[in-house]
Amino acid sequence: MDKTERRLELLRAARDVFATKGYHDAKIDDIVAAAKVAKGTFYLYFPDKRSVFEELVDGLFAKLGAAILQVDPAEDVEAQVKHNIRAIVAVLLDDPAVTQMLMSFAAGLDPAFAKKIGSFYEGVKRLLEESLTEGQRLGIVAEGDPDLYATFTIGALKEIFLESALARRVRPREEIVTALFGFLERGYLRVLPGEARALGEERVAKRRRPVRRS
Amino acid sequence: MDKTERRLELLRAARDVFATKGYHDAKIDDIVAAAKVAKGTFYLYFPDKRSVFEELVDGLFAKLGAAILQVDPAEDVEAQVKHNIRAIVAVLLDDPAVTQMLMSFAAGLDPAFAKKIGSFYEGVKRLLEESLTEGQRLGIVAEGDPDLYATFTIGALKEIFLESALARRVRPREEIVTALFGFLERGYLRVLPGEARALGEERVAKRRRPVRRS
DNA sequence: CTCTCCACTGACCGACCAGTCAGTCGGCGT
DNA sequence: ACGCCGACTGACTGGTCGGTCAGTGGAGAG
């Protein structure tokens, strides 16, 4: 087993232990036991307990950031928004352990850590808020405080993932996407109605992996 | 200073320390320092650290439970829903310290504690879900999975209070009420439109403290 | 004045655990 | 064969708190 593999092993072990016991109850001894190495080995790969935790969270943040595409108002908005929702759902549900950590342990840890997560959400919110403001200018988004809209949306998202992570209920992904979009649409989205929709999905698919054709 | 007062003093101190430092970083020594008593005194009033915390949370739970009224579909629904939102907003914003604890430390503590908070939210959700299902039967609530609607709603609520508790933004209460209601209404509420609204507020007020007349 | 009572005190204890480091061991180059 | 390297080990340490309890002081009763 080479170094990269061992590191991954430790990361995996840490992720599982954190997810089941929570940050504070997760002891380094638990993690090394799960990874079947001695305690000292852990410290060959990570400087301390918190840094493993941060690495896990950072990884998910990065995946999320990569998955979300900027919405282009010139194209079919519904399809793009649905695509983004679908992407977020996929990333988060594919890694329920880290997702649970992210959703549940938000604050309540040391201030430095809370700041980290806080600033992430703030970033996401600002992005969403800007999209919404722009959307209002274009008549795609209803009147009202975009800041509040953003907050509501993020809250709804967080809650559904928290629920999934706690495994209180497993839901088909597409059901989440459709329901959330429906909720948002009748809440504050005013999308071009009718014809364009079916085509929209296709358009986004094309942009992700461009299809060459004659 | 009599016993009740001292107890309250400790509770207040604990609340403040928990809110600023989080459960784990809040040391008994911090609490007794804030309350200006010796450590031993703390243990004359509370059996251990967790029980103070639970007492604080229970208090807020109780206040919330008391504030929320069952919605009667025969009466003006909009007014009643708004009334409930207003009540929740009032309780939570009046005690930002405990609210922050409630919103932030959801899980990530010992399992027993997580279960406590979890079961509370589950209870709230079930109640809301039932109301929504009933609402669908009556044509007040749009088609769709009431479970998802409930999750979204609670998420939106939680998020806005989390934001307030972290003092990232202070908002006029009525603004929150109106915005959230608008969001829900255009999301899935189908309320009797028009005339009944102005009267509705009055009707709810009457029910809380019955007015005898002639 | 003294005795009793009890709220209050704070030095202390022991469990717990993140992080350390002197030592082991196997593989590989020579 | 030999010695070096570095990955790995796990007993140990130092510090931190939650919780304890023998002692203090002052108020009120007799």
Image (cartoon, coloured by chain):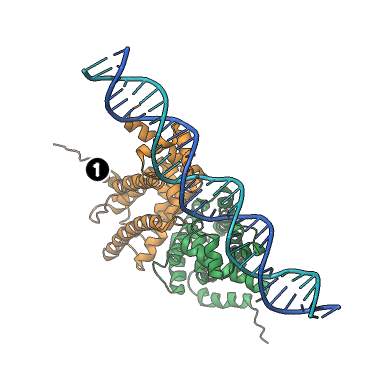
Chain colours: A green, B orange, C blue, D cyan
Q: Quadrant of the N terminus of chain B?
A: top left
At horizontal 39% and vertical 33% (from top left) the residue drawn is B9
Q: Nearer the viewer, residue B93 or A23?
A: A23
Query: Does D15 sit left or right of B91 as displayed?
Result: right
Where in the figure is residue B117, as x and y percent of width and height? 38, 55
At horizontal 38% and vertical 57% (from top left) the residue drawn is B112
Where in the figure is residue A58, as x and y percent of width and height? 61, 62
Can the viewer see residue A84 in this picture?
no
Return the chain for callout 1: B
Q: Nearer the viewer, residue D1 or B63?
A: D1
At horizontal 22% and vertical 55% (from top left) the residue drawn is B74
| Residue bearing the label numbered 1 | B208
What is the total number of numbered labels drawn onto the structure image? Answer: 1
Q: Callout 1: helix, strand or loop? A: helix
Q: Nearer the viewer, residue B3 or A135?
A: B3
Can the viewer see residue B15 in this picture?
yes
At horizontal 34% and vertical 44% (from top left) the residue drawn is B59
